[in-house]
Amino acid sequence: MSTPSSSNGFSVLRHRNFAFYLSARVLGTLAVQMQSVAIGWQVYQLTGSLFDLGLIGLAQFAPFLLLILIAGHAADRYNRRNIIALCLVAQLLCALALLAFTVAGLGVVWPVFAVLVLFGSARAFMMPATQAVLVNMVPAASFSKAVALSSSSFHVAVILGPTLGGLLYLAGPGVVYLAAATLLSVSVLLMRMTHAAPQATSREPASWHTVLEGLRFVWSKPVVLGAISLDLFAVLFGGATALLPALAHDVLHTGPTGLGLLRTAPGMGAALCSVALAFFPITRRVGLWMFGGVAVFGLATIVLGATGSVAVALVALFLMGAGDMVSVYIRHLLVQFETPDAIRGRVSAVNAVFIGASNELGEFESGLTAGWFGLVRAVLFGGAATVVVTATWALGFPVLSRMDRFPHHEKEEAARAEKSAGAA
Protein backbone atom coordinates (compact mmCIF):
# COMPACT_ATOMS: atom_id res chain seq x y z
CA MET A 1 0.00 0.00 0.00
CA SER A 2 1.04 3.60 -0.48
CA THR A 3 1.59 6.28 2.13
CA PRO A 4 -1.54 8.23 3.07
CA SER A 5 -2.56 11.01 0.70
CA SER A 6 -2.57 14.64 1.73
CA SER A 7 -6.35 14.79 1.85
CA ASN A 8 -8.17 12.37 4.12
CA GLY A 9 -10.29 9.52 2.85
CA PHE A 10 -13.57 11.27 3.73
CA SER A 11 -12.97 14.43 1.68
CA VAL A 12 -14.90 12.89 -1.20
CA LEU A 13 -18.12 13.42 0.80
CA ARG A 14 -17.95 17.09 -0.15
CA HIS A 15 -19.55 16.08 -3.45
CA ARG A 16 -23.32 16.34 -2.82
CA ASN A 17 -24.38 13.69 -5.33
CA PHE A 18 -21.98 11.15 -3.90
CA ALA A 19 -23.04 11.90 -0.30
CA PHE A 20 -26.75 11.36 -1.04
CA TYR A 21 -26.06 8.31 -3.23
CA LEU A 22 -23.87 6.77 -0.54
CA SER A 23 -26.52 7.36 2.15
CA ALA A 24 -29.19 5.72 -0.01
CA ARG A 25 -26.95 2.75 -0.74
CA VAL A 26 -25.99 2.23 2.90
CA LEU A 27 -29.62 2.26 4.11
CA GLY A 28 -30.75 -0.02 1.28
CA THR A 29 -27.94 -2.47 2.00
CA LEU A 30 -28.68 -2.38 5.72
CA ALA A 31 -32.30 -3.29 4.97
CA VAL A 32 -31.38 -6.14 2.64
CA GLN A 33 -28.86 -7.60 5.10
CA MET A 34 -31.36 -7.50 7.96
CA GLN A 35 -33.89 -9.17 5.71
CA SER A 36 -31.48 -11.90 4.58
CA VAL A 37 -30.97 -13.12 8.16
CA ALA A 38 -34.73 -13.34 8.66
CA ILE A 39 -35.27 -15.20 5.38
CA GLY A 40 -32.52 -17.76 6.02
CA TRP A 41 -33.59 -18.49 9.59
CA GLN A 42 -37.31 -18.55 8.74
CA VAL A 43 -36.84 -20.94 5.82
CA TYR A 44 -34.59 -23.28 7.82
CA GLN A 45 -37.05 -23.31 10.71
CA LEU A 46 -39.91 -24.18 8.35
CA THR A 47 -38.17 -26.93 6.38
CA GLY A 48 -34.90 -27.89 8.14
CA SER A 49 -33.51 -28.44 4.63
CA LEU A 50 -29.95 -27.55 3.58
CA PHE A 51 -31.10 -27.77 -0.02
CA ASP A 52 -33.71 -25.05 0.60
CA LEU A 53 -30.96 -22.77 1.92
CA GLY A 54 -29.22 -23.25 -1.41
CA LEU A 55 -32.47 -22.49 -3.26
CA ILE A 56 -32.54 -19.06 -1.59
CA GLY A 57 -29.47 -18.18 -3.62
CA LEU A 58 -30.71 -19.85 -6.82
CA ALA A 59 -34.08 -18.04 -6.69
CA GLN A 60 -32.20 -14.73 -6.77
CA PHE A 61 -29.55 -15.76 -9.27
CA ALA A 62 -31.73 -17.28 -12.01
CA PRO A 63 -33.59 -14.05 -12.96
CA PHE A 64 -30.39 -12.10 -12.37
CA LEU A 65 -28.57 -14.23 -14.95
CA LEU A 66 -31.39 -13.91 -17.50
CA LEU A 67 -31.69 -10.12 -17.22
CA ILE A 68 -28.24 -8.79 -16.39
CA LEU A 69 -26.92 -8.17 -19.91
CA ILE A 70 -30.14 -6.38 -20.87
CA ALA A 71 -29.82 -4.39 -17.65
CA GLY A 72 -26.29 -3.36 -18.65
CA HIS A 73 -27.58 -1.99 -21.96
CA ALA A 74 -30.30 -0.10 -20.04
CA ALA A 75 -27.64 1.43 -17.77
CA ASP A 76 -25.87 2.82 -20.84
CA ARG A 77 -29.05 4.09 -22.52
CA TYR A 78 -31.07 5.52 -19.61
CA ASN A 79 -30.28 7.61 -16.56
CA ARG A 80 -28.53 5.37 -14.05
CA ARG A 81 -29.81 7.27 -11.03
CA ASN A 82 -33.43 6.68 -12.09
CA ILE A 83 -32.76 2.97 -12.61
CA ILE A 84 -31.31 2.67 -9.09
CA ALA A 85 -34.31 4.47 -7.58
CA LEU A 86 -36.80 2.17 -9.37
CA CYS A 87 -34.88 -0.91 -8.22
CA LEU A 88 -35.00 0.32 -4.63
CA VAL A 89 -38.78 0.66 -5.00
CA ALA A 90 -38.94 -2.96 -6.19
CA GLN A 91 -36.91 -4.07 -3.16
CA LEU A 92 -39.31 -2.14 -0.94
CA LEU A 93 -42.22 -4.08 -2.46
CA CYS A 94 -40.37 -7.34 -1.74
CA ALA A 95 -39.96 -6.40 1.94
CA LEU A 96 -43.66 -5.52 2.18
CA ALA A 97 -44.63 -8.84 0.54
CA LEU A 98 -42.51 -10.81 3.01
CA LEU A 99 -44.13 -8.86 5.84
CA ALA A 100 -47.59 -9.69 4.49
CA PHE A 101 -46.77 -13.41 4.18
CA THR A 102 -45.45 -13.49 7.74
CA VAL A 103 -48.45 -11.67 9.21
CA ALA A 104 -50.72 -14.08 7.33
CA GLY A 105 -48.94 -17.04 8.98
CA LEU A 106 -46.45 -18.38 6.46
CA GLY A 107 -46.59 -22.20 6.43
CA VAL A 108 -44.84 -22.96 3.13
CA VAL A 109 -41.71 -21.52 1.55
CA TRP A 110 -42.64 -21.13 -2.12
CA PRO A 111 -44.01 -17.57 -1.64
CA VAL A 112 -40.61 -16.56 -0.23
CA PHE A 113 -38.86 -17.95 -3.30
CA ALA A 114 -41.31 -16.07 -5.54
CA VAL A 115 -40.45 -12.80 -3.78
CA LEU A 116 -36.75 -13.58 -4.14
CA VAL A 117 -37.24 -13.96 -7.90
CA LEU A 118 -38.54 -10.39 -8.00
CA PHE A 119 -35.69 -9.28 -5.76
CA GLY A 120 -33.16 -10.94 -8.08
CA SER A 121 -34.74 -9.20 -11.08
CA ALA A 122 -34.46 -5.80 -9.39
CA ARG A 123 -30.87 -6.50 -8.41
CA ALA A 124 -30.05 -7.41 -12.01
CA PHE A 125 -30.94 -3.89 -13.12
CA MET A 126 -29.51 -2.20 -10.04
CA MET A 127 -26.03 -3.72 -10.02
CA PRO A 128 -24.65 -2.45 -13.38
CA ALA A 129 -26.26 0.96 -12.82
CA THR A 130 -24.73 1.17 -9.33
CA GLN A 131 -21.26 0.16 -10.51
CA ALA A 132 -21.32 2.44 -13.55
CA VAL A 133 -22.79 5.54 -11.85
CA LEU A 134 -20.08 5.96 -9.22
CA VAL A 135 -17.47 7.24 -11.66
CA ASN A 136 -19.96 9.96 -12.74
CA MET A 137 -20.52 11.11 -9.15
CA VAL A 138 -17.00 12.38 -8.42
CA PRO A 139 -14.02 13.82 -10.32
CA ALA A 140 -11.57 11.24 -11.67
CA ALA A 141 -8.94 12.28 -9.13
CA SER A 142 -11.31 11.34 -6.29
CA PHE A 143 -12.55 8.07 -7.77
CA SER A 144 -10.24 5.70 -5.88
CA LYS A 145 -11.26 7.36 -2.59
CA ALA A 146 -14.93 7.09 -3.61
CA VAL A 147 -14.50 3.37 -4.34
CA ALA A 148 -12.85 2.73 -0.98
CA LEU A 149 -15.35 4.82 1.01
CA SER A 150 -18.31 3.32 -0.87
CA SER A 151 -16.99 -0.16 -0.15
CA SER A 152 -16.31 0.59 3.52
CA SER A 153 -19.77 2.13 4.00
CA PHE A 154 -21.33 -0.82 2.23
CA HIS A 155 -19.59 -3.21 4.59
CA VAL A 156 -20.54 -1.17 7.64
CA ALA A 157 -24.12 -1.87 6.57
CA VAL A 158 -23.17 -5.53 6.08
CA ILE A 159 -21.79 -5.49 9.64
CA LEU A 160 -24.78 -3.85 11.28
CA GLY A 161 -27.51 -5.41 9.16
CA PRO A 162 -27.17 -9.07 10.18
CA THR A 163 -26.67 -8.18 13.84
CA LEU A 164 -29.75 -5.95 13.88
CA GLY A 165 -31.64 -8.56 11.91
CA GLY A 166 -30.74 -11.27 14.42
CA LEU A 167 -31.72 -9.10 17.37
CA LEU A 168 -35.00 -7.98 15.80
CA TYR A 169 -35.79 -11.57 14.86
CA LEU A 170 -36.18 -12.29 18.57
CA ALA A 171 -39.41 -10.27 18.26
CA GLY A 172 -40.39 -12.18 15.12
CA PRO A 173 -39.55 -12.08 11.40
CA GLY A 174 -42.36 -9.59 10.78
CA VAL A 175 -40.50 -6.97 12.82
CA VAL A 176 -37.41 -7.47 10.65
CA TYR A 177 -39.38 -7.06 7.42
CA LEU A 178 -41.14 -3.95 8.73
CA ALA A 179 -37.81 -2.35 9.68
CA ALA A 180 -36.35 -3.26 6.27
CA ALA A 181 -39.33 -1.69 4.49
CA THR A 182 -38.90 1.52 6.49
CA LEU A 183 -35.20 1.81 5.64
CA LEU A 184 -35.86 1.11 1.96
CA SER A 185 -38.47 3.89 1.90
CA VAL A 186 -35.90 6.40 3.17
CA SER A 187 -33.35 5.04 0.70
CA VAL A 188 -35.72 5.70 -2.22
CA LEU A 189 -36.23 9.31 -1.08
CA LEU A 190 -32.49 9.93 -0.74
CA MET A 191 -31.78 8.53 -4.19
CA ARG A 192 -34.42 10.79 -5.70
CA MET A 193 -32.71 13.78 -4.04
CA THR A 194 -29.54 13.29 -6.07
CA HIS A 195 -29.16 15.20 -9.32
CA ALA A 196 -28.88 13.29 -12.56
CA ALA A 197 -25.18 12.51 -12.93
CA PRO A 198 -23.73 13.40 -16.36
CA GLN A 199 -22.98 10.28 -18.38
CA ALA A 200 -22.18 9.32 -21.94
CA THR A 201 -25.34 7.59 -23.15
CA SER A 202 -25.75 5.09 -25.95
CA ARG A 203 -28.66 5.60 -28.36
CA GLU A 204 -28.17 2.28 -30.14
CA PRO A 205 -31.35 0.17 -30.10
CA ALA A 206 -31.21 -3.01 -28.04
CA SER A 207 -29.93 -5.95 -30.08
CA TRP A 208 -27.71 -8.93 -29.49
CA HIS A 209 -24.82 -6.97 -30.99
CA THR A 210 -25.20 -4.00 -28.61
CA VAL A 211 -26.11 -6.10 -25.56
CA LEU A 212 -23.01 -8.27 -26.00
CA GLU A 213 -20.66 -5.32 -26.50
CA GLY A 214 -19.55 -5.49 -22.88
CA LEU A 215 -18.74 -9.18 -23.17
CA ARG A 216 -16.63 -8.56 -26.28
CA PHE A 217 -14.76 -5.78 -24.51
CA VAL A 218 -13.99 -7.93 -21.46
CA TRP A 219 -12.83 -10.81 -23.68
CA SER A 220 -10.42 -8.46 -25.47
CA LYS A 221 -8.80 -7.31 -22.21
CA PRO A 222 -6.87 -10.16 -20.51
CA VAL A 223 -6.28 -8.07 -17.38
CA VAL A 224 -10.01 -7.40 -16.89
CA LEU A 225 -11.02 -10.95 -17.89
CA GLY A 226 -8.54 -12.51 -15.49
CA ALA A 227 -9.56 -10.30 -12.58
CA ILE A 228 -13.30 -10.88 -12.77
CA SER A 229 -13.10 -14.58 -13.71
CA LEU A 230 -10.83 -15.17 -10.70
CA ASP A 231 -13.60 -13.83 -8.47
CA LEU A 232 -16.17 -15.99 -10.25
CA PHE A 233 -14.47 -19.33 -9.77
CA ALA A 234 -12.83 -18.63 -6.41
CA VAL A 235 -15.95 -17.45 -4.61
CA LEU A 236 -18.12 -19.94 -6.52
CA PHE A 237 -16.45 -22.69 -4.51
CA GLY A 238 -16.00 -20.62 -1.36
CA GLY A 239 -19.62 -19.52 -0.87
CA ALA A 240 -19.90 -20.95 2.63
CA THR A 241 -21.94 -18.01 3.95
CA ALA A 242 -25.11 -19.62 2.56
CA LEU A 243 -24.57 -22.46 5.04
CA LEU A 244 -24.15 -20.19 8.07
CA PRO A 245 -27.70 -20.85 9.40
CA ALA A 246 -26.92 -24.57 9.43
CA LEU A 247 -23.38 -24.08 10.76
CA ALA A 248 -24.72 -21.86 13.54
CA HIS A 249 -27.46 -24.31 14.51
CA ASP A 250 -25.84 -27.71 13.97
CA VAL A 251 -22.08 -27.21 14.44
CA LEU A 252 -21.54 -24.04 16.49
CA HIS A 253 -24.76 -24.51 18.53
CA THR A 254 -25.86 -20.87 18.59
CA GLY A 255 -29.16 -19.09 17.81
CA PRO A 256 -30.40 -16.18 15.65
CA THR A 257 -28.29 -13.60 17.50
CA GLY A 258 -25.18 -15.75 17.06
CA LEU A 259 -26.04 -16.15 13.39
CA GLY A 260 -26.26 -12.38 13.12
CA LEU A 261 -22.77 -12.04 14.59
CA LEU A 262 -21.41 -14.67 12.20
CA ARG A 263 -22.98 -12.87 9.24
CA THR A 264 -21.47 -9.64 10.56
CA ALA A 265 -17.86 -10.87 10.76
CA PRO A 266 -17.05 -10.86 7.00
CA GLY A 267 -18.46 -7.35 6.73
CA MET A 268 -16.35 -6.22 9.67
CA GLY A 269 -13.20 -7.53 8.01
CA ALA A 270 -14.13 -5.94 4.68
CA ALA A 271 -15.09 -2.61 6.25
CA LEU A 272 -11.87 -2.22 8.24
CA CYS A 273 -9.85 -3.25 5.19
CA SER A 274 -11.65 -0.74 2.93
CA VAL A 275 -11.17 2.08 5.46
CA ALA A 276 -7.45 1.29 5.39
CA LEU A 277 -7.56 1.37 1.58
CA ALA A 278 -9.19 4.83 1.66
CA PHE A 279 -6.13 6.18 3.49
CA PHE A 280 -3.47 3.79 2.17
CA PRO A 281 -4.55 2.91 -1.40
CA ILE A 282 -2.80 0.05 -3.17
CA THR A 283 -0.52 1.45 -5.88
CA ARG A 284 2.29 -1.15 -6.17
CA ARG A 285 2.34 -4.94 -6.54
CA VAL A 286 -1.32 -4.82 -7.57
CA GLY A 287 -1.42 -8.38 -8.90
CA LEU A 288 0.25 -9.87 -5.82
CA TRP A 289 -2.22 -8.07 -3.54
CA MET A 290 -5.21 -9.33 -5.49
CA PHE A 291 -4.14 -12.98 -5.62
CA GLY A 292 -3.06 -12.83 -2.00
CA GLY A 293 -6.48 -11.56 -0.97
CA VAL A 294 -8.26 -14.44 -2.72
CA ALA A 295 -5.83 -16.97 -1.21
CA VAL A 296 -6.56 -15.62 2.29
CA PHE A 297 -10.29 -15.98 1.54
CA GLY A 298 -9.84 -19.66 0.62
CA LEU A 299 -7.62 -20.54 3.57
CA ALA A 300 -9.98 -18.83 6.02
CA THR A 301 -12.89 -20.82 4.54
CA ILE A 302 -11.01 -24.02 5.36
CA VAL A 303 -10.58 -22.83 8.96
CA LEU A 304 -14.30 -22.06 9.14
CA GLY A 305 -15.17 -25.60 8.08
CA ALA A 306 -12.68 -27.19 10.47
CA THR A 307 -13.71 -25.41 13.68
CA GLY A 308 -16.45 -25.99 16.20
CA SER A 309 -15.70 -22.76 18.07
CA VAL A 310 -17.77 -19.62 17.55
CA ALA A 311 -14.74 -17.42 18.33
CA VAL A 312 -12.53 -19.15 15.74
CA ALA A 313 -15.37 -19.05 13.20
CA LEU A 314 -15.72 -15.28 13.75
CA VAL A 315 -11.97 -14.77 13.13
CA ALA A 316 -12.11 -16.93 9.98
CA LEU A 317 -15.10 -15.02 8.63
CA PHE A 318 -13.37 -11.70 9.45
CA LEU A 319 -10.34 -12.76 7.38
CA MET A 320 -12.61 -13.94 4.56
CA GLY A 321 -14.13 -10.46 4.39
CA ALA A 322 -10.77 -8.68 4.49
CA GLY A 323 -9.26 -10.89 1.78
CA ASP A 324 -12.29 -10.51 -0.44
CA MET A 325 -12.24 -6.71 -0.01
CA VAL A 326 -8.71 -6.44 -1.39
CA SER A 327 -9.74 -8.42 -4.48
CA VAL A 328 -12.95 -6.40 -4.95
CA TYR A 329 -11.13 -3.07 -4.63
CA ILE A 330 -8.50 -3.93 -7.24
CA ARG A 331 -11.02 -5.49 -9.64
CA HIS A 332 -13.37 -2.50 -9.43
CA LEU A 333 -10.61 -0.01 -10.23
CA LEU A 334 -9.34 -2.13 -13.11
CA VAL A 335 -12.79 -2.49 -14.68
CA GLN A 336 -13.93 1.11 -14.28
CA PHE A 337 -10.71 2.83 -15.36
CA GLU A 338 -10.22 0.52 -18.36
CA THR A 339 -13.77 0.98 -19.68
CA PRO A 340 -15.12 3.87 -21.83
CA ASP A 341 -18.15 5.54 -20.23
CA ALA A 342 -20.42 4.81 -23.22
CA ILE A 343 -20.20 1.04 -22.57
CA ARG A 344 -19.51 1.15 -18.82
CA GLY A 345 -23.00 -0.17 -18.00
CA ARG A 346 -22.62 -3.19 -20.28
CA VAL A 347 -19.14 -3.98 -19.00
CA SER A 348 -20.42 -3.57 -15.44
CA ALA A 349 -23.20 -6.00 -16.34
CA VAL A 350 -20.64 -8.60 -17.39
CA ASN A 351 -18.77 -7.97 -14.14
CA ALA A 352 -22.09 -8.31 -12.31
CA VAL A 353 -22.66 -11.71 -13.92
CA PHE A 354 -19.36 -12.88 -12.48
CA ILE A 355 -20.11 -11.35 -9.07
CA GLY A 356 -23.65 -12.75 -9.05
CA ALA A 357 -22.48 -16.18 -10.09
CA SER A 358 -19.79 -16.19 -7.42
CA ASN A 359 -22.34 -15.26 -4.75
CA GLU A 360 -25.82 -16.66 -5.49
CA LEU A 361 -24.68 -19.59 -7.64
CA GLY A 362 -21.93 -20.23 -5.11
CA GLU A 363 -24.56 -20.38 -2.39
CA PHE A 364 -26.53 -22.91 -4.42
CA GLU A 365 -23.37 -24.96 -4.99
CA SER A 366 -22.67 -24.94 -1.25
CA GLY A 367 -26.21 -26.09 -0.42
CA LEU A 368 -26.03 -28.80 -3.07
CA THR A 369 -22.64 -30.17 -1.99
CA ALA A 370 -23.69 -30.02 1.67
CA GLY A 371 -26.72 -32.13 0.81
CA TRP A 372 -24.51 -34.59 -1.05
CA PHE A 373 -21.64 -35.23 1.36
CA GLY A 374 -22.28 -33.25 4.52
CA LEU A 375 -22.13 -29.72 5.89
CA VAL A 376 -18.54 -29.57 7.18
CA ARG A 377 -17.05 -31.42 4.22
CA ALA A 378 -18.79 -29.03 1.82
CA VAL A 379 -17.18 -26.00 3.50
CA LEU A 380 -13.73 -27.65 3.55
CA PHE A 381 -14.04 -28.62 -0.11
CA GLY A 382 -15.04 -25.07 -1.06
CA GLY A 383 -12.06 -23.50 0.69
CA ALA A 384 -9.59 -25.95 -0.84
CA ALA A 385 -11.06 -25.41 -4.32
CA THR A 386 -10.68 -21.63 -3.90
CA VAL A 387 -6.96 -22.01 -3.11
CA VAL A 388 -6.49 -24.25 -6.17
CA VAL A 389 -8.30 -21.74 -8.40
CA THR A 390 -6.07 -18.93 -7.10
CA ALA A 391 -2.90 -20.82 -7.99
CA THR A 392 -4.28 -21.83 -11.40
CA TRP A 393 -5.24 -18.25 -12.31
CA ALA A 394 -1.88 -16.89 -11.16
CA LEU A 395 -0.21 -19.22 -13.68
CA GLY A 396 -2.85 -18.73 -16.40
CA PHE A 397 -2.87 -14.91 -16.31
CA PRO A 398 0.79 -13.91 -15.76
CA VAL A 399 0.10 -10.37 -17.04
CA LEU A 400 -2.24 -9.97 -14.07
CA SER A 401 -0.28 -11.80 -11.37
CA ARG A 402 2.90 -9.86 -12.24
CA MET A 403 1.18 -6.46 -12.50
CA ASP A 404 2.95 -3.82 -10.44
CA ARG A 405 0.83 -0.70 -11.05
CA PHE A 406 -2.70 -0.11 -12.31
CA PRO A 407 -2.65 0.40 -16.12
CA HIS A 408 -4.12 3.93 -15.89
CA HIS A 409 -1.31 4.95 -13.51
CA GLU A 410 1.25 3.65 -16.01
CA LYS A 411 -0.42 5.64 -18.80
CA GLU A 412 -0.41 8.80 -16.69
CA GLU A 413 3.28 8.37 -15.83
CA ALA A 414 4.14 7.75 -19.51
CA ALA A 415 2.22 10.89 -20.53
CA ARG A 416 4.06 12.97 -17.89
CA ALA A 417 7.41 11.57 -19.01
CA GLU A 418 6.61 12.35 -22.64
CA LYS A 419 5.54 15.88 -21.71
CA SER A 420 8.75 16.42 -19.72
CA ALA A 421 10.86 15.12 -22.59
CA GLY A 422 9.10 17.45 -25.02
CA ALA A 423 9.64 20.44 -22.75
CA ALA A 424 13.32 19.62 -22.48
Image (tube, helix red, strand yellow):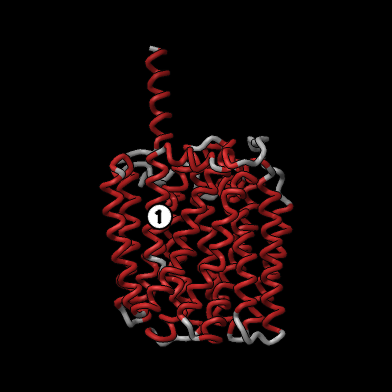
- Residue in the foreground of this view, choosing between 212 and 232: 212
Towards the viewer: 66 or 319: 66
Q: Quadrant of residue 390?
A: bottom left
In x, y percent, where is residue 261? 47, 76
Q: Position of residue 84 (x, y in %)?
A: 66, 53
Residue 135 appears in view: no
Decide if residue 407 is in sight here. Answer: yes
**Residue at 34% across / 44% down in the picture?**
286
Q: Is residue 207 above or below residue 303?
A: above
Residue sitting at x 51%, y 48%:
350
Which residue shows up at 65% across the image and 46% down it? 74
Q: Residues within 10 Å of mark 1 (few under 14, many from 20)?
A: many
Residue 131 left/right relative to 101: left
For the residue pair 305 and 1, the one nearer the viewer reads as 305
- Quarter of the picture containing the C terminus is top left
Residue 209 lies left or right of residue 364; in this view the side is right
**Element type at mark 1:** helix
As rendered, which of 347 and 213 lies closer to the eye?
213
Left or right, 239 with respect to 210, comes to: left
Q: Which residue is mark 1?
A: 231
Name the residue: 63% across, 71% down: 114
Residue 197 occupies quadrant: top right
Q: Amino acid at mark 1?
A: Asp
Q: How many marks?
A: 1
Residue 423: image location, x then y, percent:
41, 13
In the figure, 267 relative to 325: above or below? below
